[in-house]
Amino acid sequence: MPIIDMKAYARRGAEARVAELTTELNDIYKAFPDLRTGGASAPQVAGAVRRRKRRGMTGAQKAEVSKRMKKYWAGRRAKKG
């Protein structure tokens, strides 16, 4: 009974699929060259979320937050009982 190397078959299939996809991508880029560079004319994806940049806190600001939160949680523990 012959030994079948499934991994080798899978690799050959994957290589063939990559070649197909590369050809397809090249055709798409020929039709829409601005997609390659992500130019300004590319439409934004509907519902895309823009991340808000936040400034870091200074040591003094962190200490203030820490003090506030300790007071908050002490109050919660006292209320609970």
Image (spheres, rainbow, N blue to C red):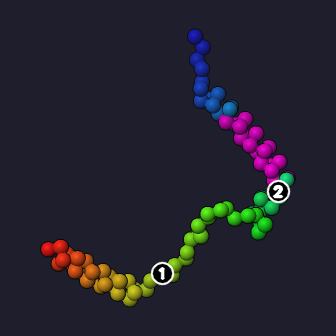
**Closer to viewer: mark 2 or mark 1:** 2
Residue at the location (71% across, 37% down)?
Answer: 17
Q: Secondary structure at mark 2?
A: loop
Q: Is residue 46 above or below residue 10?
A: below
Tag 2 and tag 1, C-beta contact below 8 Å:
no
Which amino acid is tagged 1?
Gly
Query: For this view, does 75 lie left or right of residue 32?
Result: left
Residue at the location (59% across, 67% down)?
Answer: 49
Going from N to C along the chain, the mark reached first, 2 or 1, is 2
Q: Main secondary structure of the magenta part?
A: helix
Residue that label 2 marks: 32
Position of residue 40 measured from the top left corner of the image (x, y, whole percent): 76, 69
In the picture as drawn, the residue positioned furthest to the left comes out as 81
From the image, which quarter does the N terminus lie in? Answer: top right
Q: Which mark is residue 68?
A: none
Which amino acid is tagged 2?
Phe
Q: Is residue 54 above or below residue 46?
A: below
Image: magenta residue range: 14-30
Q: Which mark is residue 56?
A: 1
Query: For this view, does 74 lie left or right of residue 7?
Result: left
From the image, which quarter does the C terminus lie in? Answer: bottom left
Residue at the location (18% across, 77% down)?
Answer: 79
Q: Is residue 17 above or below residue 54?
A: above
Query: For this view, does 45 lie left or right of residue 80?
Result: right
Position of residue 54 measured from the top left corner of the image (x, y, whole percent): 52, 78
Residue at the location (80% across, 43% down)?
Answer: 23
In the picture as drawn, the residue positioned furthest to the right comes out as 30
Query: For this view, does 58 lie left or right of residue 9?
Result: left
Position of residue 10 measured from the top left corner of the image (x, y, whole percent): 63, 31
Q: Residues within 10 Å of mark 2 (few under 14, many from 20)?
A: few
Q: Nearer the viewer, residue 20 or 32?
A: 32
